[in-house]
Image: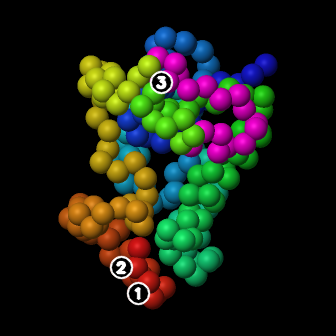
């Protein structure tokens, strides 16, 4: 019997996907996410609210933490060394899918996103479904669905120290979570490089 598995990042697309599936195709889904270990508190709170709305727990799959990997590799992740996504997100997901196989993995790719984007990166352990595409949902439909249900998405749905974020986001981190900002500064000093 196939398991029905929904990947949740906490972003708008996966949130809308999970809630809409729960409404239109009710079944015993396994919801999971892969936290990096330094996600913003707003994202943790969002996952907790999602568990309540979905009436089911979210399985948190980890493969270490970002800080642990920085110390292990003696390096900060960057565009040339993007091991953080591979080790903290993709590899744990593949291992989880292998464990629950056979499975149907529901992925939150919208109809207005390129077909190859993120498609199939989790291996051959699952049959893939893209309900947002099946429904013809673009960004407009996703945002409308969430607004109708009073769901707000946190500003950050990834690591607080993502190397891909803009300077204004680092400034926001300094203002909203100065302890985490200072921890990042200390890691930069220790590694001799910046995020």
Work out whether residue 60 or residue 159 is closer to the camera in this orientation and state it: 159
Does the magenta portion include 171? no
Work out whether residue 166 or residue 177 is closer to the camera in this orientation and state it: 166
* x 63%, y 51%: residue: 90
Quadrant (top left, top right, bottom left, bottom right) of the N terminus: top right
What residue is shown with label 1?
A: 189
| Rendered location of residue 115, percent (x, y) | 54, 35
* x 52%, y 51%: residue: 35
Rendering quarter of residue 171: bottom left
What residue is shown with label 2?
A: 185
What residue is shown with label 3?
A: 132
Q: Of tags 3 and 1, which is closer to the observer?
A: 3
- Residue interval drawn in magenta: 118-135
Q: Is residue 146 above or below residue 72?
A: above
Dot 2 falls on a residue whose secondary structure is: helix
Rendering quarter of residue 3: top right
Whole-number angstrom distance, CA of label 3 to CA of label 1? 43 Å
Query: How many C-alpha atoms fall within 10 Å of the one at disc 3: few (<14), some, or many (≥20)?
Result: many
Question: Between disc 3 and disc 1, whose residue precedes?
Answer: 3
Q: Is residue 143 visible?
A: yes
- Pointer 3 and pointer 1: residues touching (CB < 8 Å)? no
Quadrant (top left, top right, bottom left, bottom right) of the C terminus: bottom left
- Using the image, tell me which numbered label, if any, was put on residue 14: none
Dot 3 falls on a residue whose secondary structure is: helix
Does the magenta portion include 134? yes
Whole-number angstrom distance, CA of label 1 to CA of label 2? 6 Å
């Amino acid at each position: 019997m196939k398991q029905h598995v929904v990947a949740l990042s906490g972003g708008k697309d996966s949130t809308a996907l999970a809630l809409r599936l729960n409404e239109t195709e009710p079944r015993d889904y396994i919801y999971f996410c892969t936290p990096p270990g330094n996600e913003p508190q707003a994202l943790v709170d969002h996952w907790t609210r999602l568990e309540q709305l979905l009436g089911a727990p979210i399985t948190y799959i980890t493969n270490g933490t970002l800080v642990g990997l920085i110390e292990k590799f003696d390096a900060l992740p960057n565009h040339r060394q993007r091991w953080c996504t591979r080790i903290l997100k993709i590899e744990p997901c593949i291992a989880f899918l292998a464990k629950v196989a056979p499975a149907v993995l529901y992925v939150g790719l919208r109809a207005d996103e390129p077909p190859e984007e993120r498609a199939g990166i989790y291996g051959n352990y699952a049959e893939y479904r893209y309900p947002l595409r099946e429904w013809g949902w673009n960004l407009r439909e996703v945002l409308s669905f969430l607004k109708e249900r009073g769901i707000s998405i946190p500003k950050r749905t990834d690591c607080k120290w993502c190397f891909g974020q803009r300077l204004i986001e680092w400034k926001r981190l300094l203002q909203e979570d100065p302890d985490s900002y200072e921890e990042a500064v200390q890691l930069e000093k220790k590694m001799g490089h910046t995020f």
